[in-house]
Image (cartoon, coloured by chain):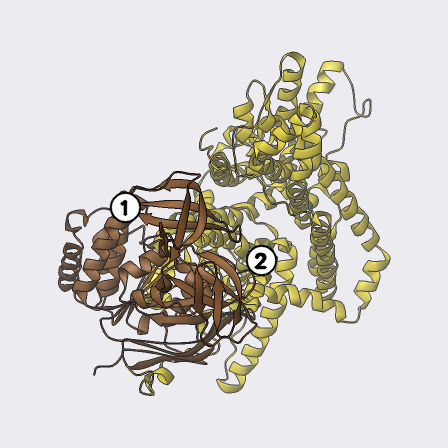
Chain colours: A yellow, B brown
Amino acid sequence: MTVAAPAGRAGRRLGRPLVDGWSLATAVVAALVGVPVVVVLASLAVPAGPVWRHLAATVLPEYVADSLVLMAGVGGASLVIGVATAWLVTLCVFPGRRLFEWALLLPFAVPAYVVAFTYGGLFDYPGPVQTALRDAFGWGHGDYWFPEVRSLGGAVFILSMVLYPYVYLMARASFLEQSVCVIEVARTLGRGPWASFVSVALPLARPAIAGGVALAVMETLSDYGTVQQLGVPTFTTGIFRTWFGLGDITAATQLAAVLMLFILAVVVAERVSRGGARFHHTSRRYRALPRYRLTGWRAAGAVAICTVPISFGFLLPGGQLVVWTLGPGFSAIDRDFAALAATSVALAAGGAALCVALALVIAYGVRLNPRRLTRAAARLAGLGYAVPGAVVAVGVLVPLGWLDGRLDALARALLGVSTGLLLSGTLVALMFAYAVRFLVVAHNGVEASLARITPAMDGAARTLGLGAGATLARVHVPVIAGSLLTAALLVFVDVMKELPATLVLRPFGVNTLAVRAFELASDEQLAAAAPAALAIVAAGLVPVILLTRSIACSRPGHARD
Amino acid sequence: MTEPALVLEKVSHAYDGVRAVAEVSLAMAPGELVSLLGPSGCGKTTLLRLAAGLEPVQEGRVAIAGREVARPGVSVPPEGRGVGLVFQDYALFPHLRVIDNVAFGLHRLPAAARRARAMAMLGRVGLAALSERYPHALSGGEQQRVALARALAPRPALLLLDEPFSGLDIRLRDRVRDETLAILQASGTATLIVTHDPEEAMYMAERIVVMRAGRLMQDDTPLGLYSRPANAFIARFLSRVNCLHATVRDGTVESPFGCFAADGIDDGVRVDVLIRPEGLRLGGADGAAARVLAVHPLGHSTIVVLRLEATGAELRARIAGARAPAPGCRVGLVVDPAQAFVFPCTGPVASG
């Protein structure tokens, strides 16, 4: 036996390069997805123009004030509704509890702008509710007070009714995750059921609840459709008005940057509020949490508390859409509708496929090379979801427009022809925006399912002679096919519902269900908008069903509760 | 002489600055069966991953079947090394049937040849009848054999087994060990078995390499390791030992059992005298006086717990059979010098 082996030349040829292809791909994807955010934030460095000074002097204080009221109102309301309903359905027993358990998620299916225009139809002066009141009491115009839907308060109410499920979902999951042991310990230490909930379960759930509230507040800041419908001036509507009304894209980008700062503040606030509070479960014993049986007026109260948000967030708007769709304008489901649906489905499918593919590249890149750099790249790619669609639209169009100009100049110089808008006026821009916005939706699912494949699986495939790419194709993808499909489905539905970025970036002549519904509703053709809106709500039910199934199985040893 | 199956030359590796493997050199002849033994966290699995190419080598070099596959900055990826690896949890592909798992590494062969070779491998491990099953429908022992067949199917120059029996319950383990040994010997593949179980290491291999804290401590035959442990750690790691404290005087150590040679240890150095339980014999009239405290019959042997009257030290003796004195008896104790080892005192030694 000799220790010296012949110096191999093969080693040098097969040497692993310093930067391998997968790490590079991860970095490139992350950088591309980060471009819009960087472009928007960089606009703050551009000296303010006259339009900006005009904005700052006139409408900016209003945008800031409205946004703050929306954040506080929606954050507070969804906190109360979400935690109360989650506590009721996880820790109490009352009639209809199992139904409410999943029904409380239904408002997730309805985009806020759809709720806004159905409420407009229902509660405005000529709407059925006020008409019925006038008929019943013989009131005339101005004889009575009725809450105004088209107001800041209306926006807070509507957004709260569709965004509380974020808090509900997180709080519920957290209550379910908690080991019964810690609660039982609190009981044996002399705390009553209510006291042990307040002193143990609620503090343990606090990080999750804060996360849910932060999501609801970020969605509020991102919203464009609702505040536009209700005529509430905020940053998102301001961006559009400045861009298309005043024609100043620099000022619009700067507005978008200020909005981004608000979003970042929410992200930071959530992190800070969490502080060091990342609780690890100290006990692995799981049993059904003790539930408190509610009877009499308590049970009735619980039913009422759960029914209100479901009614306002789902039943009322959904029912109104059905009535409109089946009403006199039934012919609205026609060839035009079919074409819209086909476009929506095609765009959503394209966006879903793109996001899942990119998510797979990033997640696998990190798995192969879990260095700080690739991890940071993956996190950067995850930022997009926090970026409002209106901001993404600006952030995508500015760099692509610049690139188009360069390409055009290059083509004219070299070939003598003008290429026009190769990127910014085409599907490229739209798909780019979807990737920026929804990559993280796919990434979360892909990453979680990849993590469930043991690293030994990679090692086994590699030592059996497969390269990294072949291993991904022959081992990982088949094993996680179901999760990939779920991730694709979630992105698909998000793209179907997406409004502001699609509104701005769609190529000429391309129309989707969401855009059409929004445009018709803006023209007060509410009944005509109903079929398209109903189709979006139907698509939105898919992730609700998926969520319902996954939280039913989320508790260890609790497959069917 | 043909090329060695595996050569590691001063291989070192650190995770985030923490040394996991330090300057390990090792060579394996073709067809040789070597156990890599050490407590958990000693770096033995890292060494295995370095050999397989699952970690890049930071220092030193690796050659497999005479071909250099790794040195700093250069690393042939695992798919280019021709090594078979059986993981602790077997890592069978859950989406593939048994036959497709075994055929997985044969992707360069045409379909018919691939299937034939996979079936032949399954036949050799005695699982031909289960070829259409999915991994989850197999018992632990069957999964282990499928993993072995899968690793051996591409005829690797070197087979690496990472704690291959630790996932099995004790009853099954002995049987699977014998089966695996037979398959390995029949295949004639050079095999490195990582284990933390000294008995398993001694049972499986003709040569054992002991690692501790990333360093190679001893490279010997099973008997050599048992009878000539290189240090106190290895003596303690192989079996439970009795320990007497003493000081070297004139090149020897005095004890109630007489003198032991302390070769190469300076006078005045504090030492531990380690005596294996099976090295203590009960009953010589001229032996050291001890009182029996407890008796634990194990059937094939009996553990006798004693207190040495001279020092008050508590000792364990393992005697053959079931005949033992009753608790309370006074007995004479004699030590078999071949089973007693003298090492400089290193303070409290962490047990494996």
**Residue at which label 2 appears:** A382
Whether residue B212 is visible, yes or no, is no
**Horizontal side of residue A430 vs B303, given as left or right:** right
Q: What's the residue type where badge 2 is placed?
A: Gly
Residue A323: x and y in percent read 54, 28
Tell which tag, 2 or 1, sits nearer the viewer.
Answer: 1
**Residue at which label 1 appears:** B172
Q: Mark 1, residues whose alpha carbon is within 10 Å: few (<14), some, or many (≥20)?
A: few
Q: What chain is tagged by disc 2?
A: A
Secondary structure of the residue carrying numbered label 2: helix
> Which quarter of the figure is the N terminus of chain A placed in?
bottom left
Vertical relation: B39 (above or below) A301:
below
Evaluate whether label 2 is on the same chain as label 1: no
Q: Cβ–Cβ below 8 Å for labels 2 and 1?
A: no
Residue B83 occupies quadrant: bottom left
Of all residues shown, which one is farthest toward the top? Answer: A296
- In terms of depth relative to the viewer, which is nearer, A503 or A544? A544
Q: What's the residue type where badge 1 is placed?
A: Leu
Vertical relation: B319 (above or below) A555:
below
Residue A2: x and y in percent read 30, 83
